[in-house]
Image (spheres, grey):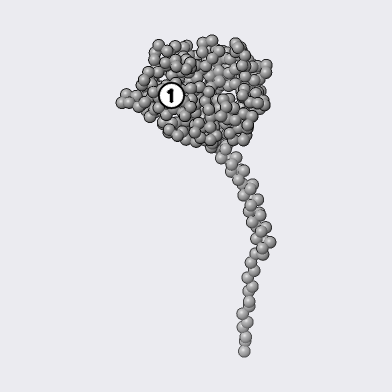
Amino acid sequence: MVQFFASRKTRRGFTLIELLVVIAIIAILIGLLLPAVQKVREAAARMKCTNNLKQLGLAMHNYESANMYFPTSGEGNDSSNQSTVMDTHSFFTQILPYVEQGNVFSKFDLNYAYNAPITDAVQNAAAAKSKIPIFLCPSNGYSQDDPKGYGQTDYMPISYTDIDPTTGARDLNSPKRYRSPGLLAVHNNISLTAGAGNYDSAGKYVPANITKRTPRNIAGVTDGLSNTMALIEDAGKNHESLSPFMLANYFDDCAACVDRSPTNRRNNYRWAEPDNGNGVSGPHQSTTSTQAKINNNASPIGGPTTCPWAKNNCGPNDEPFSFHTGGVNAVFGDGHVQFIRDSISPQTLRALCTPDQGEIVSLD
């Protein structure tokens, strides 16, 4: 008789040590993969930011072709280059028709402030609440939405520079010998003197208090369009009620206007606010280094105690600033976009901001 014996197959599982080794290997692989994914994500965001600035540079030139001069800087120098003035509207408002936002532009009555009360005829505040993607850098993960719903921008028209070419810090002397206008200039001159009466009871500009200026044209950029920056990143700003917050340097004296900040200072991160144009100066209020620099006081978020972001010109508060590693993007007068490294010297940074000072600039 044939007997059949069933063979017993033993099933063997992982030991605890083997399981821990597998988990450790997976953790190492994930640890290697995440930085690579983050680098790819940032590379894509930086490329998108570059494309945004290219679009803004193209819009700037289309505006110039139509008007024979460049758009306003929003904020700018007075005629003596000794103090600051505001224009009636911002760079971004003026270029709306050239970035396929003509429907938004058509809602503005440019005789009124951007945040004038809404009426049947004046829709400025509603138009200024439009969110326009190319005005924003996708690498900025820190700015929060405006509490009143206004559209924002991460880009800064360069209105002037007052970096001392010898010291590399802001020229605080009087007269300010080194305060030089940028490629973009104001088209109108509005005094920032408190109680100047620039607006009527409806937020309309008082013509008698507005001085017409001569905008800059291509012929006025004697240093060369390819050697002069027009806009640069200034990302990371927040409303006063948020954290980390920015405290603008200038006040909004339009008493009739809506959605002002708690201190009545200008909301200089809104794209329709003329004050988003700024000078490049360096952190003159820092208690340590006052040297002008890209991405100054970037760490920690909110700034160090020696120069917190709430102070003017510290971190992203009116200075070149981004969340890209190693520098910021800038669009030049000829429309090309270049990455400006945060190792740039103050003197070279100054030279890139001036259109007619005769400096020789060399960038790597």
Quarter of the image where one finds residue 332: top right
Counting from the top left corner in percent of width and height, residue 342 is at 63, 28
The residue positioned farthest toward the bottom in the image shown: 1
**Residue under the image location 64 percent in, 69 percent down:** 12
Which element is circle 1 on? helix
Q: Label 1 sits on what residue type?
A: Thr
- Residue in the foreground of this view, choosing between 225 and 90: 90
**Residue under the image location 46 percent in, 28 percent down:** 261
Counting from the top left corner in percent of width and height, residue 328 is at 58, 29
Q: Is residue 338 visible?
A: no
Q: Pointer 1: what residue?
A: 93
Quadrant of image for the N terminus: bottom right
Quarter of the image where one finds residue 235: top right
Counting from the top left corner in percent of width and height, residue 71 is at 47, 19
Quarter of the image where one finds residue 324: top right
Q: In the image, 330: left or right of 22?
A: left
- Residue in the foreground of this view, choosing between 244 and 27: 244
Counting from the top left corner in percent of width and height, residue 260 is at 44, 27
**Residue under the image location 63 percent in, 78 percent down:** 7
Neighbourhood count class around disc 1 (C-alpha, 10 Å): few under 14, some 14–19, many 20 upward: many
Q: Is residue 159 above or below residue 21?
A: above
Q: In the image, 306: left or right of 129?
A: right
Q: In the image, 221: left or right of 116?
A: right
